[in-house]
Image: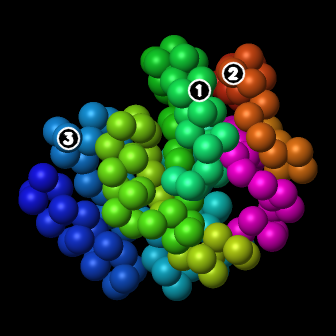
C-alpha cells in the first residue's frame, strides 16, 4: 500500500511539471493512471488524450466518484469490456477534481482501464466545449481520433448494446 501511495504521489508531482506518466501496480488489477499537463487548455484535453491512442478505438467514460449512476454504469459496461478489449478497444475513464483524490485512487484500483483526473478548470472548459450536460456520459473515438459516437446531449448510460454496437462499427473504419 505504501508503495502504491508513493507511486501515485510521484505521478502527481510529475504531472505538476508537465510529465505524462503511467503507473500500474499489482494492486491496481489493470488500472493505469495517466496524466495531462495542468497547463493544457481544457478544450485541448481530448486531443491530448486521443494522441495516446492513435490507431485504436477508444471508449471514454466521463464520470465522478460521487456519481451513483456512474458507478452503476461501470458495473454494466464491465459485461462488454472483455470482448471489446480482445478486439483492441481501449477504455478510458476521465474525471475532474470534484472526485476527491484519495477516493478516486481507491476506486480506480478496481476499474480496469486508463484513468485521467484533470483539473477543475480543464474539466469545466472541456465539458462546456463538448456541450456535456451531465455524467455519466460517453464518447467513442475512431482509430483516427475522430468522434464515432457520443451522448453528450442526453447523458446517462446509453446501454451496453449501444456502446458495444458503436464500438464494433468504429472497429471496422
Residue under numbered circle 3: 27
Rendered-image quadrant of the C terminus: top right
3D distance between C-alphas at marks 2 and 3: 27 Å
| x then y, percent, for residue 166 | 75, 26
Q: Nearer the viewer, residue 151 or 41?
A: 151
The answer to whether mark 1 and mark 2 are in CB contact below 8 A is: yes
Residue in the picture at 86% in, 61% down: 131
Q: Would residue 27 be found to the left or right of residue 121 on screen?
A: left
The Cα atoms of the two marked residues, 3 and 1, are separated by: 21 Å
Picture quadrant of residue 14: bottom left
* Label 3: how many Cα within 10 Å (few below 14, some 14–19, many 20+): few
Label 2 environment density (alpha carbons within 10 Å; few <14, some 14–19, many ≥20): some
Q: Of the numbered discs in the image, which one, if any, rests on residue 77?
A: 1
Give the image location of residue 32, x and y in percent.
Answer: 34, 47
Q: Which mark is residue 160?
A: 2
Q: Is residue 76 left or right of residue 114?
A: right
Tell me which residue sits at (74%, 17%) in the image: 161
Which secondary structure, mark 1? Answer: helix
In front of the other: 102 or 58: 102
Q: Give the residue at x 53% y 48%.
A: 93
Instruction: Give the extent of the magenta segment.
Output: 126-148
Rendered image quadrant of residue 28: top left
Colour mapping used in the image: rainbow
- On whether residue 146 falls in the magenta region, the answer is yes
The residue tagged with tag 3: helix, strand or loop?
A: helix
Question: What is the C-alpha distance between the residues marked 1 and 2?
Answer: 6 Å
Q: Would residue 133 be counted in the magenta stretch?
A: yes
Amino acid at each position: 500500500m505504501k508503495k502504491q501511495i508513493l507511486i501515485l504521489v510521484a505521478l502527481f508531482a510529475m504531472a505538476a511539471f508537465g510529465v505524462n506518466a503511467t503507473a500500474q501496480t499489482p494492486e491496481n488489477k489493470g488500472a493505469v493512471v495517466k496524466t495531462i499537463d495542468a497547463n493544457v487548455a481544457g478544450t485541448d484535453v481530448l486531443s491530448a488524450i486521443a494522441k495516446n491512442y492513435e490507431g485504436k478505438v477508444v471508449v471514454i467514460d466521463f464520470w465522478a466518484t460521487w456519481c451513483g449512476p456512474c458507478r452503476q454504469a461501470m458495473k454494466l459496461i464491465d459485461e462488454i469490456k472483455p470482448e471489446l478489449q480482445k478486439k483492441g478497444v481501449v477504455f478510458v475513464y476521465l474525471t475532474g477534481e470534484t472526485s476527491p483524490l484519495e477516493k478516486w485512487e481507491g476506486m480506480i484500483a478496481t476499474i480496469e482501464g486508463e484513468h485521467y483526473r484533470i483539473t477543475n478548470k480543464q474539466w469545466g472548459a472541456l465539458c462546456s466545449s463538448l456541450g456535456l450536460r451531465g455524467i455519466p456520459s460517453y464518447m467513442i473515438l475512431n482509430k483516427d481520433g475522430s468522434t464515432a459516437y457520443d451522448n453528450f446531449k442526453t447523458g446517462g448510460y446509453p446501454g451496453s448494446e449501444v456502446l458495444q454496437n458503436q464500438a464494433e462499427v468504429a472497429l471496422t473504419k
